[in-house]
Amino acid sequence: MNHTQISYLVFGIVLLAAIIFDLGLLSRGSKTMSIKQALYQTWFWVTLALVFFGFMWFEEGKATALEYISAYLMEWSLSIDNIFVFVLIFSFFKVKENYIPRALLIGILLAILFRVIFITVGVELVQRFNWMLYIFGAFLIYTGIKMFIVDQQDEYNPQDSVVLKFLKRYLPITLEDGHGKYRIIKNGKPVYTALFVVVVMLATTDIVFALDSIPAVMGISRNVLVIYTSNIFAVLGLRSLFFLLRGAVSKFDYLQQGIAIVLIFIGLKMLVEHWIADYVSKNTQVVISLLVIVSCIGGSILYSISHRKKGLPRDRKE
């Protein structure tokens, strides 16, 4: 068994144990997670990702480990924008507090499944058609510019969601919560509840974010192990991060701009990588990418804390 196979095996064991322990046992029933519990579990996921970083350094080497941590930080920062949309979805459908943990659990498990499918397809496309990297690069630049200019938090409205319109068109839908059930009998006919719609929208929302994040990770690393592990570790921490940040996520006013700059940087890097490879070593490129990601994400968060956008109240409600 070679080093890469060992890394996959260890990651698979960690992933299975984590799903059973955190997403399974700790999510049983309809108990809402407190801020303190959310903080502990967020530290657990971040620590686990950092421990795996150390393992990657030992098994795969410095360059691969730095690619992994860069990709993980990129995915983790994108998760905060993801959480804002989750908050809007729960608020729009007026989901009761005790139904949120289970909806998040199912939504995140579906998101992991869809991520694996998307990554597999994306990697296969790039391996077969290398020119796809240039399309991904151009897409990231376009997405980054749009994200920098347009406030996505104000732009997103669950009522206008294509997914919601699709479900209403092809399925019998009721906006009742169904007392925690996903399908109920109404007027003698089975109908799908608002909770069912919420779970579907959570999973499909993550797909939309994956359209940005997976090409971005490919811009950081072509290593399939890095792409899988960084994505899945970030998604696994979404549930605890949701309960930790849902009251404060709207205060990160400038995080979107920080992420946008990173996406533009990675997109440009993908477009010119063939030429800069002759002048800048792979290891140096990885270090530069890591520094850009940390500087932009960390800087935008700190700037958000110290500055408020004009015209906004000091404490926006969800």
Image (cartoon, rainbow, N blue to C red):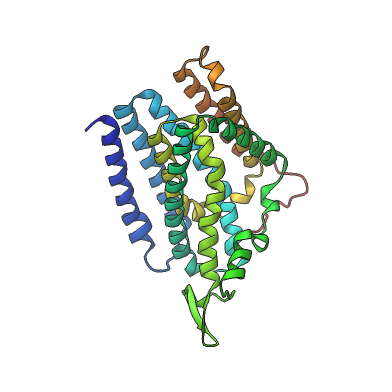
Instruction: Give the percent coordinates (x, y) of residue 125.
Output: 48, 37
Q: Residue furthest bottom?
A: 188
Instruction: State the residue in front, 112 or 316.
Output: 112
Q: Residue furthest left?
A: 1
Q: Horizontally, is 83 left or right of 113 in the view?
A: right
Q: Is residue 168 above or below residue 61?
A: below
Q: Residue furthest front?
A: 128
The image quadrant of residue 229 is top left
Q: Horizontally, is 316 left or right of 76 in the view?
A: right
The image quadrant of residue 62 is top left
Q: Is residue 17 above or below residue 288?
A: below
Instruction: State the residue in front, 241 or 293.
Output: 293
Q: Residue at x 54, y 33 (%)?
A: 132
Instruction: Give the percent coordinates (x, y) of residue 65.
Output: 39, 29
Instruction: Give the percent coordinates (x, y) of residue 248.
Output: 59, 51
Instruction: State the residue in front, 208 or 128.
Output: 128
Q: Horizontally, is 26 left or right of 162 in the view?
A: left
Q: Is residue 108 above or below residue 133?
A: below
Q: Horizontally, is 140 left or right of 59 in the view?
A: right
Instruction: Give the percent coordinates (x, y) of residue 144.
Output: 64, 37
Q: Residue furthest right?
A: 311
Q: Residue at x 58, y 67 (%)?
A: 167
Q: Is residue 170 above or below residue 19?
A: below
Picture quarter with the C terminus? bottom right
Q: Residue at x 45, y 63 (%)?
A: 101
The image quadrant of residue 7 is top left
> Is residue 296 visible in the rendered structure shown here?
no
